[in-house]
Image (cartoon, rainbow, N blue to C red):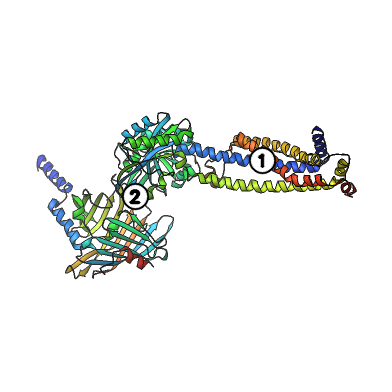
Amino acid sequence: MGRLLLIAARNLRQNRRRTALLSAAVVAVTMLLVLLGSLGNGIQATLLEAGTAMITGHVNVGGFFKITSGMGSPVVVDAARTLADVKELAPEASRIVQRRRGFGKVVSESDTIQCALTGIDATNDEALRGILRIREGSLDNLDADGHSILLFEKQAERLNVSVGDDVTLSSQVVRGQTNAIQVRVGAIARDMGLLSIMSSYVSLDVIRDLYQLDPDTTGVILVYLDDPEQAGDVKARLREGLLARNHRLMEDEPDAFYHKFQQVAGEDWTGMKLDVTTWEDELANIQWTMKTFDTISSLLIGVLLVIVVIGVMNTMWITVRDRTREIGTLRAIGMGRFRVLVMFLLETVILSVLSALAGVLLGAGIAELLNSLRIPVSQGFQIFLMSDTLRLVVSPRSLLLAVVVVPLLTTFGALIPASRAARLRPVTAMQHAG
Amino acid sequence: MPLHMLTLTATLLLSAAAVPALALDADGMKKVLETIDERQRNAGDHKSLVYIQTKEKSREDVVMEAVVYRRDASDQFMILLLKPKAERGKGYLKIDKNFWMYDPTVGRWERRTERERIVGSDSRRADFDESRLAVEYASEYKGEEKLGKFTVHHIRLTEKPGADVPYPVTELWVDKETNNVLKRQDLAASGKLMRTVYTPKWKKVYSESKKEDVWYPAEIRIYDEVEKDNSTVVLIQEVDLRPLPENIFTKAWLESKSR
């Protein structure tokens, strides 16, 4: 085997140009595989971090209150009792925070935008504090006067407002009347792509005043866990426990709360029903970005891999043709068919493994470099990437995948020419003119 | 004149200026509101052709043509849109306490709130419906004022519990001479001014069922006070008070007109 390895290495060295070209192709594809994988990981990581801070907890206890069967509001009444029950039923929670939910218009002198209005306890909402990058003002302003709003850059730009300016919030309230209140812009945060297009944050009191809610109400109780993987178990326990404590529960529907309005309005019940969801349920509709990205990158990588495999196959055909007389001689002096096959395959294995390793190292290095440069991305990409800068996360799993998959496929591409070489009859091969 | 007499005279004059002249008492106000309602009430059916022009910032003006059908005795109400082409066949129908919107492009009925904007304009269903001020609101007299050349009663109305009105508080400026409402300001629960409505032109049409004239605002100018660049003008024309077909206020009838 050692001798075969030596022969394979010698052949690669002798055909430097061919080897260099093939190596470059394999390095490039592996590097691209690593970079696209890292970009995908980056989006997934951002989605998890930002989504579970901005939109959802790891487990959420929300629900709808219906005055009439046709009109549901995302309000949890009897909030104090519900909160106490949630605390008891989820003792492993690392944090529990409350938010209020609303939707309406933000109107300035210049323009109007429509967005989800989330009432937050800015002082205690650590997840949100950790993820938002404040460009102007402070999140503390939201708690300081109780009537402030946090806008994202593009929203503030469109409304032509800055910190300290007043805007009007207008929304249809529980009985269908429109209410409007004036709030002050307390902070402007950097955009966060898809997650910041349709949402803004206000003080808890703003939502209460806008919707004229009783103080003992909330919108949703967000439960954060040290291990988000436990979310499913905690959700099941909460559902069971809340039912046992005489809370009415909605059917378990793994979907975001804002997708449930129509369904709830069509159901024939009034009063309060709680809804328990996990972060995966709430982000289900945003996961399409991941699926889209995965599909596009898989297609791209697939096409590139096919090109490389065809290139390897073609090169091996040429090699076999060039070395037909050599093969004949080797066969004549006693080398078996299998050893000829292995000799040719070893050339591809050495080339592809070394190139894939180089590609992985290069890809990981470029990913780190791009991260350190904090490259800003265009508005269109921001929506997709959910960040205003390029973020790549290199995972050992994707590196290992690249190192295994690329050599496997290229070796597979070399299998047919190598087996053809192994099948050559020594007499025929030695008579070859090539 | 002694100083104390001068002071007294000045005080009386100031008091006269501060206190509204001829203030209406509770009965007087109720009478004014009942008169407003009664002048617009029709004992039978109502059909009118309306034009709704909406102006919004950064959008082209839209003019819609619609027919409003009412049967006030049984609290039935319907709007059928005729123009523009994109909105043709769309309709609103009130059945009992429910307010429905029909969209012929998807062939679906959607339950809507009674207080929502009509076809995205600043108008509400109540703007096209019969006046029920005395029934739906508690009133407070704010004073007698001048509105341009008109002398008007300024009345503040607050919704009564359970009343189905688009705004909880409304202020009216009522022509003292004719009892026509000339100006109206609608306020949100927070006290914020939401819209100002002017009804400068009032017309009357003879009602066979009522055996007297029925008054209606021929022109309604609505100014959005939140989104200041938005406004709506509603022109009410061709008011017909003859009886409508019996089965007109049904989903099937509106759908048939939408085809």
User: Label 1, on which residue?
Assistant: A405
Q: Where is residue A244 drawn, in percent x and y?
A: 33, 35
Specify whether A77 is left or right of A389.
left
Packing grade of label 1 (10 A; few <14, some 14-19, many >=20) is some
Where residue B251 appears, as percent x and y from the top left, is 32, 63
Q: Position of residue A39 (x, y in %)?
A: 59, 40
Q: Residues within 10 Å of mark 2 (few under 14, many from 20)?
A: few
x then y, percent, for residue A285: 47, 46
Pointer 2 or 1: first along the chain: 2
Q: Say left or right for A95 vs B113.
A: right
Tag 1 secondary structure: helix
Disc 2 secondary structure class: loop
Per the model, the C-alpha gap separating discs 2 and 1 is 51 Å
- Looking at numbered disc 1 in the image, what kind of residue is underneath it? Val
Which one is in front, B20 or A214? A214
Could you tell me which quadrant the C terminus of chain B lies in? bottom left
Q: Are marks 2 and 1 on the same chain?
A: yes
**What subunit carries mark 1?**
A
Quadrant of residue A327 within the rendered picture: top right
Residue type beneath disc 2 = Glu
Q: Residue at x 71, y 46 (%)?
A: A308
Is residue A188 visible to the viewer in this orientation of the structure?
no
Residue A205 lies in quadrant? top left
Res. A260 visible in picture: yes
Residue at image mark 2: A267
Q: Nearer the viewer, residue A363 or B124?
A: A363
